[in-house]
């Protein structure tokens, strides 16, 4: 279509000015126009770069929407530097380096525009003096950002739509702060909404973000956002991502159909979630990491997980508060891990949980007040030493087991009621502790309280009723009632509808068998990304000396060459310490290590013990382990990788940074891959802080040989390589025997020989997991054992504990 004419209607009052005029070009018309004039553009294509300096009205003809195309061959098609009115235009960018529409000053009003380009940005609002109002505009930019608001700019966008973006749909940065009302962003290849940088903020009301090849909403680097009545769905990455002091408020929002985490927070970010719904997510509904990171959720609902992960994951020192919330139809409701991590749950419902409603481990704390747990395999499980918290005035109904306390955990359970458990109301084993005050168990198909040998629990004012196997069962034959006890629980003023406390001879070892798809006591926590096993940032001082830790190392199955290498390192460090105390020179010992070998050969376990040894010798301050992989170190854009690597290194200060599958940082077809940036950053940090952190890189032998050649400084930092050989069948058998002993099972006659044959015949392909395979084999045997014994009316002790050759799974 050829270029048309432009009619200028002058609004000035001076008599000498003509009321109207026609011009052959937009540029000429704009030069002739004065403040308040109206420029009506005839249909056509205008190959001009327009700059509007005055408050004029620029519009297409009435009833002919889209007939006017502003499409120069290069540069910015339309630049606004005044409070103009722009209506009914089609703006087409041809220059990959320039935005199609640029607002630099004033408060222009833009309505019913269609912006089509393949450039850096469709619409760009730049500078503190820019405050546009944009209504019913559409942006189509498959090469760059849909709408970019930056450098302190603001503005209001009403009923606008980004139909495609090669990067973020809407990007807010460098102190900008726009408002979105009833906007739609979809088919973006970056984040749907992105806010980054201190002072940057976004307010969105009634907006929808969907079909995003990235995160739906991404707030980073001290950015803030407030979303009300918004929907985020159908993303390929996390629904909402917060990182590095980000602040987000979600009110009356709906986040659903997310294949990864619905909401992921890290690095001191803060989320306030009110009357919002999180549903149909593939990993965690809420994934909350790092000290200072916090979620406050009030009147929210999290439900219908499509994956095998906990609905709420709290780790590495983070905090979550759930107040008047509902969590239901998920594999696990709440997992709290790592020292310093905390979850406070008040007046909330956790129901239809396939596995564990509340799991507390690795020194974390959980407090539940006035909560209701229904239809779970396990109501609450306090897993290990240092893990604890309080359950106060809670009810647990129709669970397999109400509360489990194991491995030295020590929670306080007060005024809680467990109704109709399938196995036990409260179960304490493996030196678990716990204080149970005024608790009640009703209608148990097993015991009310079952406390195993060596568990020093305290029961006060508790009550059991209608428990099929007995109200109280103590494996050491009784309970102590005084201060002079030597072991077992302390029981005071507890009652039962039986004649008295059950105090029988030591019973057969109790086994909580699996039911439905639940893993019972043998179930492991769902596997998270590598960094999710990271140790706390501020661990306690080591409780064991080097001899004790080396003893644990020696007790590991196999690994003879590894043990020799670690002992040699330990001896060198210890002798060096003694020489320095004697005023002698000590040889420099390279502490950074390379671990090579197949998966499941104990590399992570040895790394943890190595950290403890170095801490006991005074080489490291804490000795804790922080485990990371490529996904935790490599960012999505230039500069972010160095930040992530620095943060991981800082978390490991005083301990060990364990980089699993380190060769993934330098793929063979890397090109411009950011993994090299992580390697370069890590090498420099190791040099600048050589005494603060020990770094261990691990992976397959061949791939790690290539990794050591990617940077001249890598090989010099890692002067010692320790190879982890595959376990032989006899060692895999020993691992199964250890698992059996730990879980109170035994191998029947012939089972050992059958296991040896099984491990010998088992295919050793790339998916073979060595020690992991041995543990999985044991778990499969337990499942098959449970299916067999569950059919027996009165199983004997041998029935409950012996694993037979027929319990072995079939070879793949």
Image: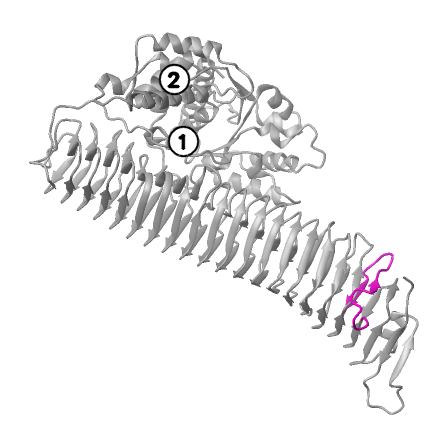
Q: Position of residue 25 (x, y in %)?
A: 90, 70
Quick check: is 73 in the magenta stretch? yes
Q: Which residue is mark 1?
A: 615
Is 123 above or below relative to 220? Answer: below
How many labels were placed on the picture?
Answer: 2
Position above or below: 753 against 124: above
Q: Which residues are magenta?
A: 60-80
Residue at 61% x, 42% y is: 635
Crowding near pointer 1: few (<14 within 10 Å), some, many (20+)? many
Which residue bears the numbered disc 2? 735
Q: Is residue 801 above or below residue 17?
A: above
Name the quarter where the N terminus is drawn.
Answer: bottom right
Q: Position of residue 724 (x, y in %)?
A: 50, 18
Question: Which of the numbered marks, if any, corresponds to residue 56?
Answer: none
State whether residue 316 appears in this view.
Answer: no
Please provide percent x and percent y for residue 269: 49, 52
Which secondary structure, mark 1? helix
Task: Give the overall secondary structure of the magenta segment.
Answer: loop
Q: Give residue 466's quadrant in the image.
A: top left
In this rendering, is residue 734 above or below 465? above
Mark 2: give few (<14), some (14-19) or many (20+) Cα within 10 Å.
Answer: many
Q: Nearer the viewer, residue 642 or 178?
A: 178
């Amino acid at each position: 279509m050829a270029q048309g004419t432009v009619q200028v209607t002058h609004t000035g009052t001076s008599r000498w000015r003509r009321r109207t005029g026609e011009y052959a070009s937009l540029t000429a018309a704009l030069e002739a126009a004065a403040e308040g004039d109206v420029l009506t553009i005839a249909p056509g294509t205008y190959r001009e770069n327009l700059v509007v300096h005055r408050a004029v009205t620029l519009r297409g003809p009435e009833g002919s929407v889209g007939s006017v195309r502003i499409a120069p061959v290069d540069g910015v098609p339309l630049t606004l530097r005044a409070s103009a009115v722009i209506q009914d235009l089609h703006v087409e960018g041809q220059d990959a380096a320039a935005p199609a529409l640029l607002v630099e000053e004033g408060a222009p009003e833009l309505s019913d525009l269609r912006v089509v380009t393949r450039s850096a940005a469709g619409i760009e609002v730049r500078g503190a003096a820019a405050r546009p109002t944009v209504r019913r505009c559409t942006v189509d930019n498959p090469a760059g950002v849909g709408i970019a608001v930056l450098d302190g700019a603001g503005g209001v966008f009403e009923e606008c739509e980004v139909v495609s973006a090669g990067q973020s749909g809407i990007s807010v940065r460098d102190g900008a702060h726009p408002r979105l009302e009833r906007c739609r962003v979809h088919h973006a290849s970056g984040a749907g909404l992105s806010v980054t940088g201190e002072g940057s903020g976004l307010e969105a009301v009634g907006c929808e973000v969907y079909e995003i090849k990235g995160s739906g909403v991404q707030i980073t680097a001290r950015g803030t956002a407030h979303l009300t009545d918004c929907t985020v769905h159908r993303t390929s990455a996390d629904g909402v991502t917060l990182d590095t002091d980000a602040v987000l408020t979600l009110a009356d929002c709906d986040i659903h159909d997310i294949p990864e985490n619905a909401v992921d927070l890290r690095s001191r970010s803060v989320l306030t979630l009110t009357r919002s719904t999180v549903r149909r997510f593939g990993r965690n509904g809420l994934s909350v990491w790092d000290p200072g990171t916090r979620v406050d959720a009030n009147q929210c609902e999290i439900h219908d997980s499509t994956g095998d992960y906990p609905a709420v994951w709290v780790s590495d020192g983070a905090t979550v508060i759930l107040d008047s919330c509902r969590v239901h139809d998920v594999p696990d409701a709440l997992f709290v891990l790592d020292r310093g991590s905390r979850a406070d749950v008040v007046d909330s419902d956790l129901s239809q949980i396939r596995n564990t409603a509340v799991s507390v481990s690795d020194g974390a704390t959980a407090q539940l007040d006035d909560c209701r747990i229904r239809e779970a395999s396990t109501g609450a499980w306090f897993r290990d030493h240092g893990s604890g918290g309080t359950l106060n005035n809670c009810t647990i109904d129709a669970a397999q087991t109400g509360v489990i306390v194991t491995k030295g955990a020590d929670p306080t359970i007060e005024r809680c009621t467990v109704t109709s458990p399938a196995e036990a109301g409260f179960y304490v084993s493996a030196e678990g502790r716990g204080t149970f005050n005024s608790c009640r168990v009703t209608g148990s198909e097993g015991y009310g309280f079952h406390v195993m040998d060596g568990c020093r629990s305290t029961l006060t004012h508790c009550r059991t009723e209608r428990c099929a196997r007995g109200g109280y069962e103590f494996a050491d034959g009784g309970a102590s009632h005084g201060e002079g006890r030597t072991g077992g629980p302390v029981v005071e003023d507890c009652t039962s509808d039986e004649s008295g406390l059950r105090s029988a001879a030591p019973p057969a070892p109790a086994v909580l068998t699996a039911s439905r798809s639940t893993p019972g006591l043998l179930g492991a926590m769902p596997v998270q990304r590598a960094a999710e096993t990271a140790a706390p940032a501020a661990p306690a001082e080591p409780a064991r000396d080097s001899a004790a830790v080396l003893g644990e190392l020696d007790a590991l199955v196999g690994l003879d060459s590894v043990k020799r290498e670690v002992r040699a390192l330990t001896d060198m460090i210890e002798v060096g310490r003694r020489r320095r105390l004697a005023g002698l020179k000590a040889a420099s010992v390279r502490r950074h290590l390379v671990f090579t070998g197949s998966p499941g050969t104990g590399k992570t376990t040895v790394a943890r013990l190595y950290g403890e040894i170095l801490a006991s010798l005074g080489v490291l301050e804490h000795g804790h382990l922080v485990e990371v992989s490529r996904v935790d170190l490599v960012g999505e854009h230039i500069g972010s990788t160095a930040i992530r690597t620095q943060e991981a290194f800082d978390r490991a200060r005083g301990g060990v940074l364990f980089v699993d599958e380190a060769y993934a940082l330098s793929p063979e077809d890397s090109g411009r891959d950011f993994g090299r940036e992580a390697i370069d950053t890590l090498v420099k940090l190791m040099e600048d802080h050589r005494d603060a952190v020990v770094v261990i890189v691990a992976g397959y032998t061949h791939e790690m040989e290539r990794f050591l050649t990617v940077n001249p400084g890598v090989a010099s930092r890692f002067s010692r390589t320790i190879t982890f050989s595959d376990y032989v069948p006899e060692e895999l058998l020993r691992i199964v025997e250890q698992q059996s002993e730990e879980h109170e099972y035994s191998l029947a006659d012939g089972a050992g020989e059958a296991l040896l044959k099984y491990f010998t015949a088992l295919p050793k392909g790339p998916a073979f997991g060595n020690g992991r395979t041995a543990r999985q084999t044991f778990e499969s045997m337990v499942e098959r054992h449970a299916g067999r014994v569950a059919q027996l009316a009165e199983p004997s002790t041998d029935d409950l504990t012996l694993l037979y050759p027929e319990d072995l799974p079939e070879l793949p």
